[in-house]
Image: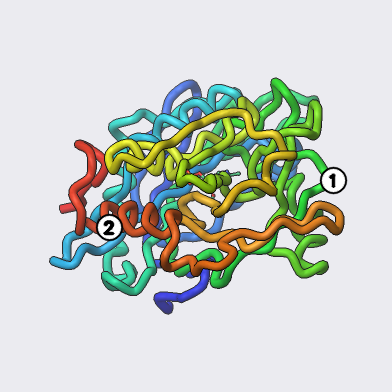
Amino acid sequence: MSKDKAFSYNPTPYRFVAKYRDGSWDEGGLTEDANIVLNESACVLQYAQNVFEGLKARRTADGRIVIFRPDMNIARMKESCRRMYMPAFPDDRFMEAIKDVVRANKEMIPEYGTGGALYIRPFMIGTDPVLGVKPATEFEFRIFVSPVGAYFDRMIKLRVCDYDRAAPNGTGKIKAGLNYAMSLFPIAEAHELGYDENLYLDAATRTYVEETGGANIFFITEDGKLVTPRSETILPSITRNSILKVAEMYGIPAEERRIAFSEVGGFKECGLCGTAAVISPVESIDDHGTVYTYFKGETFEGSKAMQLKKILTGIMEGDIPGPEGWVCEVE
Ligand code: PLP
Ligand code: COI
């Protein structure tokens, strides 16, 4: 077991598991078994009934263990469960289970100041066999953790993707595996062509900026304003929500609004934000050969995006006091 530098699956000794049967969740508990045995016709295998979350635990300079805004992930997973016709795991037990798994695997949390974190992955699947298309009635809820490093280790090159991510009134605003299944072909293709991620446009008109396959996007205008898309078909990123609040706290003008793709050439900086991505600078967006570049004539180090990143990670690591309730300590 290594405290890996990359963003990859590094199994740790313990995970949490609970099962739902006959209308209620069992007591659940920690297990060392990383494998799940399922019937061949389990709903998750045939009809992709699953939802998941992603959050991080970190070590502070004085050795405490803190988790960033877990209440937001718990609330978002409840919404995902509702849309996927799954029974939410009770909030208070969810919070305790997150802390239990982190505590049980605390030796695996990367040291303070390394940029690493313990990624926490709660998920739920429909487990009983179905053949006709209908939701499962039995479910498994699990939380595993994995020490991770940076998701992107360089400035990101995006390409405008010709595939759509999320339909109007579809599932784009929840965190369900199906939204990522559809992105596997486009991301493989993007990587083969030398890009790091896909930029998706709105499926209805293909004229507005949405997000990438695994993170929200934001821009900084020439006069220093933070701008990020408002859309009903993107994942409501907790990192983005936090950046908007940080901007407000530090007097940086910020706006969440529809962003026409025709505007992207006019912005000074561009970045991706998410739990895995944290805040990662975008070097360029390639729209079928027309390339828009960012951070021209300046380094990321001196940018507004970096200023936001420093404040946000400072709060996440316990160096800078954040708003009430953002940093949840695991005793
Ligand atoms: N958008 C997508 C599609 C994601 O997978 C993620 C990652 O969770 C995000 C945005 C960022 O969300 P958050 O900041 O809550 O991690
Ligand atoms: C996250 O940032 O938590 C994600 O889920 C993004 C990606 C790893 C799917």
- Residue at the (61%, 25%) spot, across then down: 232
Residue 10: where, in percent of width, then height? Answer: 48, 69
Q: Which one is nearer the viewer's eye here, 228 or 49?
A: 228
* Image quadrant assignment for residue 166: top right
Q: Is residue 179 left or right of residue 163?
A: left
- Residue at the (46%, 37%) spot, across then down: 19
Identified by mark 2, the residue type is Gly
* Image quadrant assignment for residue 304: bottom left
Identified by mark 1, the residue type is Asp
Q: Is residue 11 left or right of residue 331?
A: right
Residue 320: where, in percent of width, then height? Answer: 20, 54
Identify the residue position indicated by label 1 in the image: 162
- Residue at the (28%, 32%) spot, across then down: 92
Mark 1 residue crowding within 10 angstroms, few (<14) / some (14–19) / many (20+): some
Question: Is 27 situated above or below 272?
Answer: above
Query: Residue 314 has which mark?
Result: 2
